Image: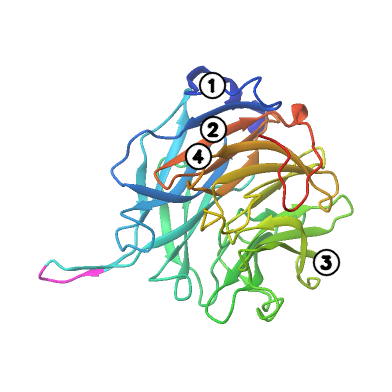
Amino acid sequence: MLRSIRSVATLILLVTAHSAAGEQPGLLSQSFIYEQASFPQCHASTLAETPQGLVAAWFGGSHEKNPDVGIWVSRHIDGSWTDPVEVANGIQYSTAGGRVHRHPTWNPVLFQYPDGPLALFWKCGPSPSTWWGEMAISEDNGATWHSAHRLPEHIDGPVRNKPLLLENGTLLCGSSTEFDGWRVHFEMTADQGRTWQRTEAIHDGKEFGAIQPTLLRGADGTILALCRNQDGNGNILQTSSGDGGRTWSAVAPIALPNPNSGIDGVTLDSGTHLLVYNHTRRGQGNPKGRAMINLAISEDGQTWQAALTLDREDRSEFSYPAIIQTSDGLVHITYTWKRTRVRHCVVDPKKLQGHDLTPDKWPLP
């Protein structure tokens, strides 16, 4: 079904605000999903391809953790992105006197089921240590949403990155908690979110504080999870599973830095892996270490090469990326741009060129 979609990339290139073609091999275009919005700040975007094209979501409001933060959605239709629409918020109840009790929302995740609905997961609650998971579905490619509900106790859904649909129809979700150390666990649903299973935390959170896993597929059937590291001077963390996500190896660092910031990866149809992340560490005039965001490429998920510099500016923030491959073979990336907008990049993975790198040096401008 998705193979019959008009080329998403062709439509985007017609309206691209800034073309980077020729500047870096493989980077076709960069633009913003919106120029202005009713909310001043945004963060944590997510992407999915539907039968009618791309859908993006993120949280937006006054600022992260403010109760007015809601989940916003935009659809790519006829070559342009629709105006952002708020589709979920943290309103719990209102009183007879008109007072509204509301919590902030966090970290939306979109997932398009093959020949099924588009699912939206998000978090609601005062903080990451106290939030809970919620979900809704769309039967019309993100235009409207229904069946919004809170997930079962201790089920958060995919905590920040897209889930992985296994061959047996199980949706494997990388999840994590932050109330008893930063610890990763995994959740599974075989019936589109009606019932769930959950692993225990796969580590104690003491040697490594890991959250927000992104999932990659190995050629041998192994699932590799790469995780954000609580240590802003540490490296991306990894764990792997050979039994469909039921058990996992010990958490260990890989040779890519992580300034305690979100990452996202995708395994292409070719088997090649791409990872979007900040190849930086905290400090040195950049307290959060998010002044550069990068794309790396790997054939085995273990050895990585530099592919693209997506954004770079001192004392700025480019963070919390999302990455997918669409049915036309192209790759789409979104990320937080200075906390004010969501940037969208289109990449031709066949044109990417790998460059040797070290944890402390990014080789591209």
Who comes first in sequence, dot 1 or dot 3?
1
Within-10-Å neighbours for mark 2: few <14, some 14–19, many 20+: many
Q: How far apart are marks 2 and 3 (CA)?
A: 33 Å
Q: Is residue 79 magenta?
A: no
Name the image quarter holding the N terminus: top right
> Alpha carbon of mark 2 to alpha carbon of mark 4: how far?
7 Å
Query: Residue 176, located in which quarter of the rendered image?
Result: bottom right
Instruction: Indicate which disc residue 226 carries.
Output: none
Q: Tell me the tag on residue 53.
A: 2
Residue 109 vertical position relative to residue 30 in the rendered view, above or below? below
Q: Residue 102 appears at what percent x and percent y?
A: 29, 67
Label 3 crowd bin: few (<14), some (14–19), many (20+), radius 10 Å? few
C-alpha distance separating marks 3 and 4: 32 Å
Q: Name the residue under label 3.
A: 243
- Look at the numbered discs 2 and 3 and tell me whether their residues touch, using CB distance below 8 Å: no
Which label sits on residue 11?
1
Which residue lies under the disc numbered 4? Answer: 55
